[in-house]
Image: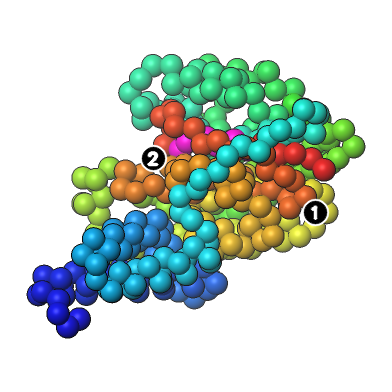
Amino acid sequence: MKGLKFIDKLIYLVNALVATMLLLSYILPFFPPKTFAVLSVLSLGVPFLILVNVLFFLYWLVKLKKQLMLSLVVLVIGYFSFGSLYKFSTSEDNTKDQSTLLSVMNYNVRLFNVYDWIPENGIETKMVDLIKKSSPDVLSMQEYHPHKNIDLSFFKYKYEKLSGNKTKYGQAIFSQYPIINSGSIEFPNTSNNAVFVDIVKKQDTIRVYNVHLQSLKIDADVNKLKEEDSERLLKRVGQTFKMQQFQTELFLLHKKQCHYKMIICGDFNNTAFSYVYKEIKGDLKDTFKHAGNGFGRTHNFKFFPIRIDFILADKTFEVTDFKTFDDDYSDHYPILANLKLH
């Protein structure tokens, strides 16, 4: 650091700390949260750490200082390990035969705003209008509630698994294609679970999973987050990660018994830099990485873009298109992928 002014030396020290944290976060997906629960929390902050390292790189680039190499090397390692945080993709949907396409939407609907989290009338009907306009063949929903104003009868088939005493809610899958089998994978000591259906399109039987892992219960409100005790927050998130790992293990046991082409949708309550994402994804395609655009933000977290909702597809599918919606009807944003059957 010879030749640097005192302020630049301080900046470089912070740069080194942030770069080290990002580098450490790259290896965490390979270690179960039960082993390093508190460290696993870093996986949530990877998008933020990447953005900060980009800013440090630009800072040193403008100053024409060799210190830019620190963040550059760490960012390049991350790019080759996980791909870009920001995607530049174009639609590849040139298929004229629509019978070979399958459109899949995933949406955490937060009980269709039944408790008026969004102080606006008719949120639930706006959600239905959005779904109807998008016209997916398969719709996977988390925190589904059979709201009195909800009419999804334009889907021919459905499977839902609900719980709760006063307010029924759970996971649901709607389909335009016949459902020949369905079921639920129960997670103990929680209302979260995974459901599945087997649908038939032409000669293909396709397994569709809807996975909702344990919620982190982190409030996106800045003032409420400031009131949280940081040590208690870290401990709680660490415990949640342990629950997510156990839920993932239960899911993988079920998944292993399926020999159909597979699509996994869901709200993982964790990022693409996490252990649970790596385990659930396996050799499936992340449809956003193949055809998405931008940051792919799926949760209304105010501090930085975060992607915790996914559509993963069997490697035999071609991902022709992917869309992340920006409609503020829930604390999550819906996503839609178009898949070509081979």
Quick check: 201 above or below 269?
above
* Residue sitting at x 59%, y 62%: 278
Q: Nearer the viewer, residue 325 or 340?
A: 340
User: Which amino acid type corresponds to the residue marked 2 in the rendered image?
Assistant: Asn
Check disc 1: other Cα within 10 Å, few if <14, some if 14-19, many if 20+.
few
Res 172 seen here: no
- Which numbered dot is residue 92? none
Give coordinates of residue 97: x percent, y percent. Answer: 80, 28
* Residue sitting at x 15%, y 71%: 8
- Which mark is first along the chain, 2 or 1? 1
Mark 1 → mark 2, Cα distance in angstroms: 34 Å
* Residue sitting at x 61%, y 37%: 91
Question: For the residue labelled by badge 1, is the local secondary structure a helix, a strand or a loop?
Answer: loop
Quick check: 293 above or below 124?
below
User: Which amino acid type corresponds to the residue marked 1 in the rendered image?
Assistant: Cys
Give coordinates of residue 215: x percent, y percent. Answer: 46, 50
Magenta-drawn segment: 332-337
Question: For the residue labelled by badge 2, is the local secondary structure a helix, a strand or a loop?
Answer: loop
Give coordinates of residue 195: x percent, y percent. Answer: 67, 44
Q: Nearer the viewer, residue 19 or 104?
A: 19
Q: Mark 2 = which residue?
A: 300
Q: Mark 1 = which residue?
A: 258
* Residue sitting at x 44%, y 46%: 295
Residue 76 falls within the magenta-colored stretch? no
User: Furthest residue to the bottom?
Assistant: 2
Kindly indicate the quadrant of the structure image that contains residue 70: bottom left
Position of residue 99 in the picture relative to residue 137 (left or right): right
Quick check: 325 above or below 3?
above
Q: Nearer the viewer, residue 261 or 232?
A: 261
- Where, quadrant-wise, is the N terminus in this rendering? bottom left
Residue 333 falls within the magenta-colored stretch? yes
